[in-house]
Image (cartoon, rainbow, N blue to C red):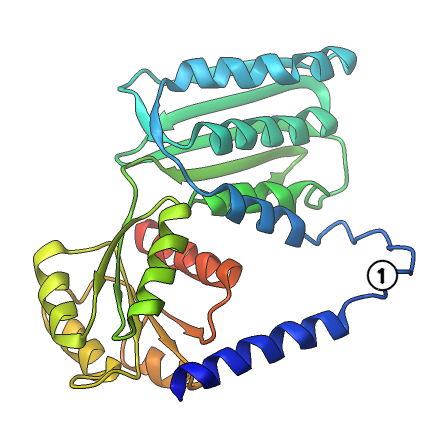
Amino acid sequence: MRERLRGIEAVAEMLWERLQAPDAAREPSEPEWNQTTSVDHELVDLGLQRELLDTAELVADAVASVQPLADSRSVTIRTSVAPGEPLFADRTLLRQTLIASLGIAIQRASAGLVELEAQRDGQALLIAVRWRDGEPTEEDRAWPSLQSLVAAQMGSCAWSQSAGQAAVTMRLPIGPPATILAIDDNDSSLRLLERLLTAGGYQVLTASDGYEGLRMATAQRPDLILLDVMMRGMDGWEVLLKLKAMPETRQIPVVVCSVLGEADLAASLGASSFAQKPLRRLELLDTIRGSLAARHSPA
């Protein structure tokens, strides 16, 4: 009966979204510049696939891609890449991030010079793109797309401007794929989560009840836990309390997943975030990225 209810709710939600969509015969309107839904959806479909990369080589390739645009605007690009070991990152997403940030700088630079600096900081790559800005003090129209690219890599970015100098700074994790432990007593839900998270570039562990979930969390120390609430034996709230009570697991971010709208209760018990069931792929992956990024952000 629970599965039937979930299915009915999922179909009803899909039909409601179709009902709210614009009439297919109507001429589609131009999206607002700050709407990034299509970008986010494409990035989710693309997933995250890390490989060993040479930072200097990747930066050089990105600069070569935007060089014609820089030449057309009489802009000089100067790069500084700190030497170091190869990094473990997604080549496609990192390359597009470099191109997007350089593109913003080239379009706005007024003094003919754009500087890009890249260096490692532990398990993160720090990238700064600076230029003298002749535009008003506001974020660029392409900024939301750059934010989406950075978020897809579980990173963070910031825009700053002072006394005519502007900069975009980014912090991107460059370690191996994050490991996620999914705890749910429904086998179908576990298999669905496993496929979705694997496609998203994560390593996935699964546990079919709360007891097994606690054992795996203690032994494996995953980067994040997805926790169902409605489970037999030991429910999700009991599991969450035990996770937060044990020194070896209390720092692991936990995303509580429930058909019950109890986000406030989840937060009060120490959960990093809450995901309403039925789960939506884009929203779930965005929630996971946010929780992981918050964990790796400097204090």
Among the 4 quarters of the image, the one containing residue 3? bottom left
Q: Identify the residue at horizontal 29%, vertical 47% (top origin).
A: 178
Viewer-side residue, 13 vs 136: 13
Task: Give the x, y percent position of residue 285.
Answer: 45, 57
Q: Identify the residue at horizontal 14%, vertical 77% (top origin).
A: 242
| Residue 32 appears in view | yes
Q: Identify the residue at horizontal 42%, vertical 32% (top origin).
A: 90
Task: Give the x, y percent position of residue 263.
Answer: 41, 81
Among the 4 quarters of the image, the one containing residue 207? bottom left
Q: Quadrant of the C terminus?
A: bottom left
| Residue 248 appears in view | no
Task: Give the x, y percent position of residue 74.
Answer: 75, 12
Viewer-side residue, 10 vs 249: 10
Q: Is residue 282 left or right of residue 241?
A: right
* Residue wearing tag 1: 24
Q: Vertical placement of 286 versus 142: above or below?
A: below
Disc 1 is placed on an element classified as loop
Among the 4 quarters of the image, the one containing residue 247? bottom left
Q: Quadrant of the N terminus?
A: bottom left
- Counting other residues with Cα less than 10 Å from the Cα at mark 1, is it few (<14), some (14-19), or many (20 or more)? few
Q: Is residue 142 left or right of residue 291?
A: right
